[in-house]
Image (tube, helix red, strand yellow):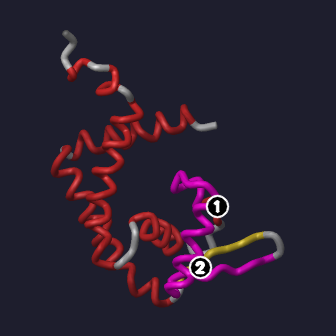
Amino acid sequence: MKKLSDSYYNKCIYFVSNALARKIEKIAQQSWDRVNLAPSHGYLLMLVLEAPGIQPTVLSEELHLTPSTITRLIEKLEQKKLLVRIYEGKTTNVYPTPKAKELLPKLKECVDDFYASYSSALGKEESTKLIQSMNRIADKLAG
């Protein structure tokens, strides 16, 4: 009889990647709780703080999210008075508010805490390699 550990399902990228995503999401949520933001909101906000006037299409590319998801994230952050959109013709530019700027040190703490949490479990070298591999794989599977 075949051992369960040898089964196809335990080697399937679909299940393994989803299990990893759930575990990483839990660590990320714990790290971002201190600012009452979901990790995706926090990272988007940090990109806008880093590049005021950034366009949603750039945010979409940077965060590997669909344009509609970026729009929903921006809307939520606008409701929290952390972002504003300014329209110039057909171009939309996203800017941080003063409230967002005040939050930046805490946002950086969240990123540092998240990195410390997963890199202590995986090791810094393995963490770096994993992220590089995942980016490369995501690019290959895109489209």
- The residue positioned farthest toward the left in the image shown: 120
Taken as a whole, is the magenta stretch helix, strand or loop? helix
**Magenta highlight on residue 62:** yes
Q: Nearer the viewer, mark 1 or mark 2?
A: 1
Q: Quadrant of residue 89?
A: bottom right
Q: Amino acid at mark 2?
A: Tyr
**Residue pictured at 45% horizontal, 64% vertical:** 40
Q: For the residue labelled by badge 2, is the local secondary structure a helix, a strand or a loop?
A: strand
Residue neighbourhood size for the residue with mark 2, other residues' Cα within 10 Å, grouped as few (<14), some (14–19), many (≥20): many
Q: How many marks?
A: 2
Query: Taking 87 as reference, is 108 left or right?
Result: left
Q: Which residues are magenta?
A: 59-88
Q: Position of residue 81 (x, y in %)?
A: 52, 87
- The residue positioned farthest toward the right in the image shown: 89
Label drawn at residue 136: none
Quadrant of image for the C terminus: top right
Q: Of 13 and 55, which appears nearest the observer?
A: 13
Disc 1 or 2, which lies upstream in sequence?
Answer: 1
Label drawn at residue 95: 2
Q: Position of residue 75 (x, y in %)?
A: 59, 76
Q: Of 60 and 47, which appears nearest the observer?
A: 60
Q: CA distance from mark 1 to mark 2?
A: 18 Å
Q: For the residue labelled by badge 1, is the local secondary structure a helix, a strand or a loop?
A: helix
**Residue pictured at 41% horizontal, 34% vertical:** 14
**Residue pictured at 46% horizontal, 69% vertical:** 41
Disc 1 marks which residue? 68
Compared with residue 28, is residue 128 higher up or lower down, i.e. above or below? above
